[in-house]
Amino acid sequence: MHALILGAAGMIGRRLTKALVASGTVGDHPLDALTLIDVVQPDAPAGCAGTVRTEAADLTAPGAADTAIAGRPGIVFHLAAVVSGEAEANLELGYRVNLDGTRLLLDAIRRAHAADGYRPKVVFTSSLAVFGPPLPPVIGDDWIVTPASSYGTQKAMGELLLADYSRRGFLDGISLRLPTICVRPGKPNKAVSGFFSGIIREPLAGRPAILPVPDTVRHWFASPSAATGFLLHAAGLDFGRLGLRRSLTLPGVSATVAEEIEALRKVGGDKAVALIRRDPDDAVARIIETWPEAFATDRARALGFTADASFDAIVAEHVAEFQAGA
């Protein structure tokens, strides 16, 4: 199978690429071609049994979406996005990338379907930010989508487009509402949720970290490896089992900031915890308080999606990778 990864240079894109190359399969199919696209040139992976093409491209540029699917990939992983904080700060950029980029991709597939019957599987990474107030302590699979941020609105629009194009038979799609990925390696990004990783990653590296919200804030998390596992598992699913409801809220770990800090203390001691500096940020807090705290993910679990065992396990994974130089 030919796999296309959009947003391939990002953290999850790189991990997904590595996992696909390592397994040599996509679901039950051999991986015979891999196309990697991002706004910066993705690195070509070593050891891929199939052909590999990498390209630096902006999906919203004229003709870019048509070029991306010119090789008729059997599966498209659409990971490309502007993150939450940037989407809130720059309304035009957020809608151009997160909404227009998705619409242009789906329309390119629709035109290809009309021309030659092309109908790929599309895995779209959505977000728990599609939910907003009023929020119960635990959100079930039937809770209404009411985003309270531009990023959440853009992701919700992408979900609806994907569901409609799937209903019409142009493609076979699934939207995965990812938990907040923690602990993200590397440098901080512009995601509003970035501090959740920062208060673990930075102190363990001997650097100070800023905490902009109270210790009582509770959130929904998944490790980078769990997020990669979600995408790999989705690739092998029969999307027909979803019916018309093409969006899935994925399993995760519900934890408070205080519980995060205690998980940090277990591996880094009081010395690491002391590097966290509390600096309240009302703008961040206002956005975070509109996000859910926990979910009942019965539909996703019934389809075989699994979560991390605990927040301690999430931190332990990060420590193991950090020590290995990953």
Image (cartoon, grey):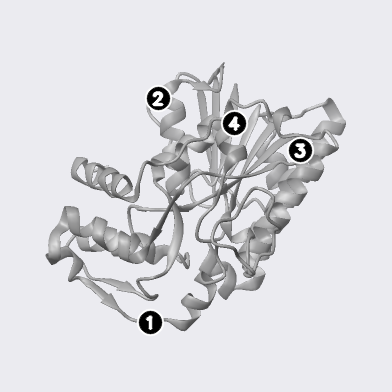
Q: CA distance from mark 1 to mark 2?
A: 43 Å
Residue 39 horizontal/vertical position (percent): 54, 52
Which secondary structure, mark 3? helix
Instruction: Name the kind of residue labelled 4 in the image.
Output: Leu
Instruction: Name the kind of residue labelled 3 in the image.
Output: Ile
Q: Is residue 215 above or below residue 254?
A: below
**Which residue position holds label 1?**
280
Instruction: Name the kind of residue labelled 2 in the image.
Output: Ala
Quarter placement of the C terminus: top left
Q: Earlier in the sequence, mark 4 or mark 2?
A: 2
**Which residue position holds label 3?**
109
Q: Are marks 4 and 1 in contact (CB under 8 Å)?
A: no
Q: In the drawing, what numbered circle is on residue 22? A: 2
Q: Earlier in the sequence, mark 3 or mark 4?
A: 3
**Which residue position holds label 4?**
303
Q: Are marks 1 and 2 in contact (CB under 8 Å)?
A: no
Which secondary structure, mark 2? helix
Nearest to viewer (mark 4 / mark 1): 4
Which secondary structure, mark 1? loop
